[in-house]
Image (cartoon, grey):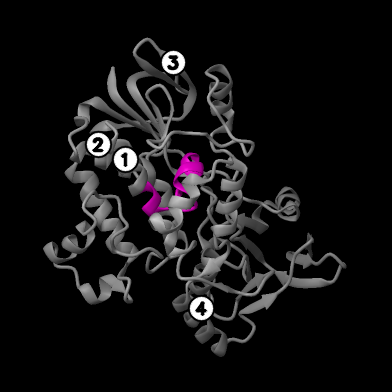
């Protein structure tokens, strides 16, 4: 039997593992990290690599290690050029630096020794903790369990795009689709649908690879914010009042209101404006209502039936569906063990992020306690601190 089982090996689960191991709450042979991928942080690396994000949106103190200044120390200790490793006054780390730091920690802590590749079939109470059955049939038992799953598997597809995918499979993709082919295998020109940070990074990348053959199609003006929620949510300024809110419906409303959905930082907007000066057709406004494949090209129409865009390939940068993750196996667990949920379907948990006996959550599942930063790197750090400090 394991002492701790973590379901999910992304940013959240890897951060939690790091805290447990470094604070001597568990040994590596007493820990199991269950994830469907072969490597820790597989989804995060794939997503950020797909759009070639040069720098993270978060500052240097937000990473998966315990010491807030671990990333800065890593730069000095490993001969990285500090000038190219960080951006701006907030010292936002480069994607490559962040990945190097994560790989170093994974190797240093021997996280692969705790890695169990597989997908959850069912979870149930065991005599002294919890039992997990994987889809492969493998059974694991642990005294404590942490659910660190997110919404990154729940890609958001507009209805018109779903229909187009059925009619013409190779004409539309979600940028975060695991089966995304190489861009060189797709038919140009490209239309990127979206208006947030993912869409802009993708547009800039494609415009470099395929000059004059890319257009960003957005439905709203650019929303400029340095972060995806106000920095006040990182600490007591906003969190104190949030936790005093007794109504979980109001907490959910605050979370929705606080998130700067579809926003971009100012430096990225400036970079895009520079490219627009070189190519004034790079960005256009419009909302797609219908799409059809006509004579080897995709035609996008608005609600009035007017042609918005004619293109070769549509790339969706439309984010994720924010419903409860893991519903197919988590819903029966909720019912069987009468785990408390709010009207929005998300867990009602304690201040220590405990949902049931020896059962903890973090990431998206901890939103109603951590707040709008729960899914972010900063939220992962706060969740890991809360859980380890309670032990």
Q: Tag 4: Cα neighbours inside 10 Å, few (<14), some, or many (≥20)?
A: some
Residue 193 versus residue 176 in the image, above or below: below
Q: Residue under circle 2?
A: 20
- Distance from the alpha carbon under mark 3 to that under mark 1: 22 Å
Circles 2 and 4: CB atoms closer than 8 Å: no
Q: From where the camera sits, is residue 210 visible?
A: yes
Q: From where the camera sits, is residue 39 visible?
A: no
Q: Tag 1: Cα neighbours inside 10 Å, few (<14), some, or many (≥20)?
A: many
Element type at mark 3: strand
Q: Give the residue displayed 33% in from the left and 71% down from the top.
A: 90
- Distance from the alpha carbon under mark 2 to that under mark 4: 39 Å
Q: Residue under circle 4?
A: 269
> Which of the two labelled residues, at mark 2 and mark 4, occupies the earlier sequence position?
2
Q: Give the range drawn in magenta.
A: 365-380
- Could you say which disc has been placed on residue 125 in the image? 3
Circles 2 and 1: CB atoms closer than 8 Å: yes
Q: Give the residue displayed 53% in from the left and 84% down from the top.
A: 273
Residue 156 versus residue 357 in the image, above or below: below
Question: In this view of the protein, which residue sits in the foreground, 32 or 213?
Answer: 32
Magenta stretch, main secondary structure class: helix
- Could you say which disc has been placed on residue 16 in the image? 1
> Which of the two labelled residues, at mark 3 and mark 4, occupies the earlier sequence position?
3
Question: In this view of the protein, which residue sits in the foreground, 313 or 46?
Answer: 46
Say which quadrant the N terminus sits in. Answer: top left
Residue 46 versus residue 136 in the image, above or below: below
Q: Give the residue displayed 53% in from the left and 55% down from the top.
A: 181
Q: Tag 2: Cα neighbours inside 10 Å, few (<14), some, or many (≥20)?
A: many
Element type at mark 1: helix
> Which of the two labelled residues, at mark 4 and mark 1, occupies the earlier sequence position?
1
Element type at mark 4: helix
């Amino acid at each position: 039997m394991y002492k701790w089982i973590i379901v999910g090996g992304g940013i959240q689960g890897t951060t939690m593992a790091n805290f447990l191991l470094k604070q001597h709450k568990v040994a590596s042979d007493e820990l199991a990290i269950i994830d469907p991928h072969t490597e820790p942080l597989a989804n995060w690396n794939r997503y950020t690599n797909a759009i070639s994000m040069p720098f993270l949106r978060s500052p240097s103190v937000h990473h998966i290690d315990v010491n807030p200044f671990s990333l800065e120390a890593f730069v000095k200790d490993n001969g990285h050029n500090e000038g190219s490793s960080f951006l701006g006054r907030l010292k936002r780390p480069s994607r490559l630096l962040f990945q190097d730091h994560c790989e170093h920690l994974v190797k240093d802590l021997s996280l692969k020794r705790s890695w169990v590749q597989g997908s959850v079939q069912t979870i149930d109470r065991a005599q002294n903790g919890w039992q997990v059955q994987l889809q492969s049939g493998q059974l694991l038992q642990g005294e404590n369990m942490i659910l660190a799953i997110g919404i990154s598997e729940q890609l958001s597809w507009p209805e018109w795009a779903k229909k187009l995918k059925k009619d013409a499979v190779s004409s539309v993709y979600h940028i975060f689709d695991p089966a995304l082919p190489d861009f060189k295998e797709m038919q140009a020109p490209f239309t990127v649908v979206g208006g947030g940070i993912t869409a802009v990074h993708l547009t800039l990348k494609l415009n470099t690879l395929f000059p004059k053959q890319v257009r960003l199609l957005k439905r709203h003006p650019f929303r400029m914010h340095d972060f995806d929620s106000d920095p006040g949510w990182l600490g007591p300024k906003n969190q104190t009042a949030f936790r005093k809110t007794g109504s979980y419906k109001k907490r959910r409303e605050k979370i929705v209101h606080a998130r700067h959905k579809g926003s971009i930082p100012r430096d990225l907007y400036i970079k895009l404006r520079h490219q627009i000066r070189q190519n004034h057709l790079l960005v256009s406004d419009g909302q797609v209502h219908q799409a059809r494949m006509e004579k080897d090209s995709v035609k996008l129409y608005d609600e009035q039936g007017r042609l918005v865009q004619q293109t070769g390939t549509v790339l969706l940068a439309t984010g994720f569906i924010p419903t409860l993750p893991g519903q197919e196996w988590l819903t029966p667990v909720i019912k069987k063990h009468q785990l408390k949920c709010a009207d929005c379907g998300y867990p009602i948990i304690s201040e220590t992020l405990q949902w049931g006996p020896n059962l903890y959550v973090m990431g998206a599942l901890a939103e109603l306690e951590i707040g709008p930063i729960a899914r972010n790197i900063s939220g992962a750090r706060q969740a890991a601190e809360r859980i380890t400090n309670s032990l």
